[in-house]
Amino acid sequence: MTKQPACGNTPALSRRAMLAAIPATAALPAAAMVTSSLPADLSAENGVGGTHSEQRIRQFCEWFDLEMPVLEYEDGDIAVTEELIEWVREAGVSLDWVFCGDVKSMAIAYRQDRQQMADWAKIIERFDSGEQKIMAKALRRHHEGRCSLDDALSQMTSDITTYRAGGAAA
């Protein structure tokens, strides 16, 4: 099977070629990167074969009930093909974790998500139960495809204003 370029003007790269392109001063030794974050249940001793990267992909698919992507190999390593990059985008997996075992990018994303959720929680807790019902109704209308998000939020604002003025919008 012929590898396709990862983007229009770049040839397909193997993991080895991708890591070789990183300046030596910017990378840890590959063994340290791979073994430092590999969960014990992904080790070859536990019957899971393949490269560490393949094991991580299999584990991610298991955790999130995803279909395993078709993997191509070059010199024993997983080739970074256009199809693999597309799967990574759709699945939301970190390339740093898959190929290097580095969990930092996932920890950063988790922290940012939690901070954003905390910000939203602070906003929502300012609403009383009637205002929260108005907000839920507006978001439900949008989610069901009955209106655009802008229209839902506009109607929500109007309904909350009426509710706060003593009207019966809730």
Image (cartoon, grey):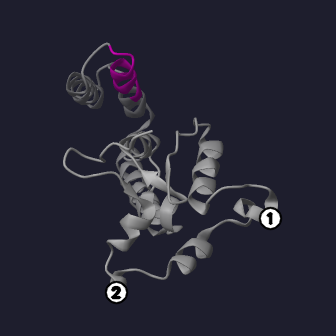
Query: Hey, which residue is sitting farthest bottom in the picture?
Result: 25
Residue at (53, 75) in percent of width and height: 33
Residue at (44, 66) in percent of width and height: 16
State which region is magenta. Answer: 136-145
Tell me if residue 106 comes above or below residue 127 in the rendering.
below
Q: Answer few, some or many: residues within 10 Å of disc 1's Cα (few below 14, many 20 plus, some between 14 and 19).
A: few
Say which element carries label 2: helix
Residue at (62, 37) in percent of width and height: 65
Task: Identify which amino acid the numbered label 2 is placed on.
Answer: Thr
Tell me if residue 105 comes above or below residue 33 in the rendering.
above
Circle 2 is placed at which residue position? 25
Q: Using the image as rendered, state which of residue 145 and residue 71 is in the foreground.
A: 71
Tell me if residue 133 comes above or below residue 120 in the rendering.
above
Task: Identify which amino acid the numbered label 1 is placed on.
Answer: Glu
Circle 1 is placed at which residue position? 45
Quadrant position of the C terminus in the picture: top left
Residues under labels 1 and 2: Cα distance? 32 Å
